[in-house]
Amino acid sequence: MALVPPHGGKGLVCCLLQGAELAAEQKKAEGLKKIDISPRAKGDLIMMGIGGFSPLNGFMSKADWKSVCENFTLADGTFWPVPVTLDMDEEVKVGEEIALFDPKKGVFMATMKVTEVYEMTEADKKWECEKVYKGQGEESADDKFWEIAPKDHPGVQMVMAQKKYNVAGPVKVLSEGDYRDRFPGCYMSPAEARATFEEKGWSKVAALQLRNPMHRSHEFLAKIAVEVCDGVFIHSLVGNLKPGDIPAEVRIKCIDTLIDKYFVKANVVQGGYPLDMRYAGPREGLLHATFRQNYGVSDMLIGRDHAGVGDFYGLFEAQEIFDRVPKNLGAGKDLITQPMKIDWTFYCYKCDGMASLRTCPHGKEDRVVLSGTKLRKALSEGAPVADHFGRDEVLDILREYYSSLTEKVEIKMQSHAAATKM
């Protein structure tokens, strides 16, 4: 059997230039109008460059933006769950070529042919937030969302801080940033991941999304996937996170340690991808599955509160949303990667091991709730970590990281993770 095909029916759409073509376009960029871009746009560009966002070859038009927010599809009917847009204040004209510049690193990231410029009013931004970021949790209730989200939801903050215009058009990507240098052997393109899986003879591949260090629940999910698939792809976000999240270098060191000591290495591949978190909860779960299809992944592990923020989303809303997405869209247009839905997992003292609500008959007094947010809060405050929460080798790495910090970050707990026992 073969790996699942890339999303969109066009193969891997890679916008990253190489060789002489790259050198010529880099020189051309120096003479174009220079537009500074956000870290989020930089990550989106790299994903378009390496084929991670296939079939996208540029930033979305207004019709695409509206259809994605409202219908979960691009304007041509291809499934896509989250807007990928470029905002700016600068005046540009349709037909103009511009150079997209990373001001932090001082490099040109891409050139772009402008095909559309559309204004994003305050009302437009609010509409996007309500469609994409509003969930079914208590903080998303109609009387609470706009009271709480502007100060507590990083995804909503990101959208509301966008500039006056969105600019659409195809891109030619000039750089992958410094990810290959920073994460050698981990950061990989979809083509590289597919080659690795094919070399191993895998066709049914599960992905575990990580933005937190791997605790026992993550380990349990990965091992469930190993049992029912050819292998598991532990795929970490190496782009930007919100304050209080743990840097990618530390998380990858933790995963390396876990794989070395607690996994059959032949059945696991660790990888990194260059996006920033959007913190879009269930919609982001769909995005994770969509671009994982481009990496060759057939099954996306979706556990409790996947990509969640605070109490904006129901505990299993990121699983349930897969049942509501449009289907039978046409050749290549459907989402093929499917969710592997796992119930609430925890350590049970009476079971003497990891379990879930489907397998453990005992009461909440016998269970240790496992939460990445809860782990970060305990470590940041120097508080003790409950037995069986994480592997000792991983906790040692994390304690060393937290002891090196000179400034502590306040970490907000979700209500369901606030207690040790569930």
Image (cartoon, grey):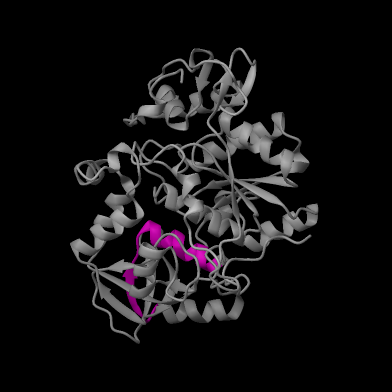
Q: What is the quadrant of residue 124 in the picture? A: bottom left
Task: Give yes or no for residue 208 being in the magenta stretch.
Answer: no
Q: Looking at this view, is 37 or 115 the one in front?
A: 115
Q: Looking at this view, is 297 or 184 the one in front?
A: 297
Looking at the image, residue 64 lies above or below residue 156: below
Q: Is residue 386 left or right of residue 205?
A: left
Residue 59 appears anywhere in the view: yes
Tell me residue 269's x, y (percent). Answer: 69, 46
Looking at the image, residue 142 lies above or below residue 163: above
Instruction: Locate the N terminus and report the quarter of the image it occupies.
Output: bottom right
Residue 104 appears anywhere in the view: no
What stretch of residues is rendered in magenta? 30-49
Q: Is residue 34 left or right of residue 293?
A: left
Looking at the image, residue 415 lies above or below residue 49: above
Looking at the image, residue 290 lies above or below residue 210: below
Task: Give yes or no for residue 43 being in the magenta stretch.
Answer: yes
